[in-house]
Image (tube, rainbow, N blue to C red):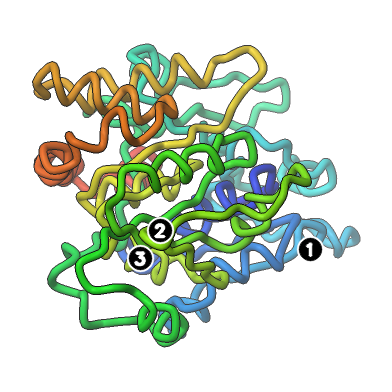
Amino acid sequence: MRWDIFCQIVDNYGDAGVCWRLARSLSSLHGQQVRIFCDDLPTLNLLASGSDEALGHKIDIQPWEASYSNARHPVETPDVVIEAFGCDLPERYLAGLFIAPIKPIIINLEYLSAEPWVAEFHAKASPQSHGIPKYFFFPGFQEDAGGLLLDPIPLEGGQVAHLIPQSLKSIWLKLRPGAKRMSVFCYPGAPLRKWLEDLAGIGENVDVLLTHGHAELLNLYGEKTIALPSNIQLLSMSFVSQDEYDWVLSQCDFNIVRGEDSFIRAQLAGKPFIWHIYPQEDRAHEIKLAAFLDLYLDNANQELRLATIAAMTWAMPSQWLKSLETWDSHSKVWRAHILKTQGDGGLAARLVRFIA
């Protein structure tokens, strides 16, 4: 089948990351023909870089306007159209679908949530006046939700420690033997500067890998340059591809992540992490975080529950870091759990079965 995925980038990398991972899963695992129409090709192409070259040739990446650029001829009608995160289809593209002899199915791919109500609304029809069938599809952790994007399932850290990506070799030489490793990928609103200063006060040697742009983020509000004691080493990474970032997550003892894609990849790395969920004005993000933690900590003891909740809500490291070893064990159990519950192939496979 032929799929058109429409992606409008709101959150820098997150929206594009999900769309690219879905496209590669549909193509490489399920033999589908996929086009992506994106309104920010530079970002999408950055994320796609580093992937298998053959895979890159299979997925047709196009600018947003290419979906309707040849207005004198009908749209090349796909079997499935995905509106990623509820983005509106271009009017001229939609008009072409109206006159197509065989109508596609439109999927409104929603944001990932662990909230219980997701299963109730998942895969429900959304009647449209134009008559083209449309459905809501909700990714989720539950068996009766839309599933998670798992491809590729990463090997555990120790199995790939020697496979250092070329783009990371220079920075990896600067890591200190015996130092803890932490990666940081968060939104500007995080109290990152204060968090690092508190971490320094614990006295442990920690190498902190700052993802692209985060060194500048530490001085976003015009403060003086951050000064940390020698037990903390800040290392600024260049932009890396999805697969390279997956490798970084697997090699760190602790990760701070944001958005949907890195959130799932941190869990598949089997390491403790902070999910800096995208902040919303109505504080809906707090409900989403609490719903995830209810699932994530279902079998955790009280001490770990309190430590993890504190960390996820940006309590200072000195308040919870002593629980890191227990949290690490829990993270590995959780990784095994989601691989088992998503053993049917997760989001991509459930989409293909739903369409069929």
* Label 2 Cα neighbours within 10 Å, binned few <14 / some 14-19 / many ≥20: many
Residue 261 disc label: none
Of pointers 1 and 3, the one earlier in the residue sequence: 1
Residue 66 disc label: 1
**Residue at position x 68%, y 48% from top?**
9
How much space separates mark 1 and mark 3, taking CA atoms? 35 Å
How much space separates mark 2 and mark 3, taking CA atoms? 18 Å
Q: Amino acid at mark 3?
A: Val
Q: Is residue 308 above or below residue 328?
A: above
User: At numbered mark 3, what does the secondary structure look like: helix, strand or loop?
Assistant: helix
* Label 3 Cα neighbours within 10 Å, binned few <14 / some 14-19 / many ≥20: many
Of pointers 1 and 2, the one earlier in the residue sequence: 1
Residue 107 shows in the view = no
Q: How many marks?
A: 3
Proximity of marks 1 and 3: CB atoms separated by less than 8 Å: no
- Left or right of residue 94, residue 21 in this image: left
User: At numbered mark 2, what does the secondary structure look like: helix, strand or loop?
Assistant: strand
- Left or right of residue 157, residue 196 in this image: right
Q: Nearer the viewer, residue 248 or 197?
A: 197
Query: Residue 227 at x, y = what percent?
Result: 56, 55
- Left or right of residue 103, residue 116 in this image: left
Residue 248 disc label: 3
Q: Amino acid at mark 2?
A: Ile
Q: What residue would you read off at disc 2? A: 232
**Residue at position x 66%, y 22% from top?**
128
Mark nearer the viewer, 1 or 3: 3
Q: Is residue 64 above or below residue 159?
A: above
Q: Amino acid at mark 1?
A: Ala
Query: Residue 24 at x, y = what percent?
Result: 43, 64
Q: Is residue 61 above or below residue 264?
A: below
Mark nearer the viewer, 2 or 3: 2
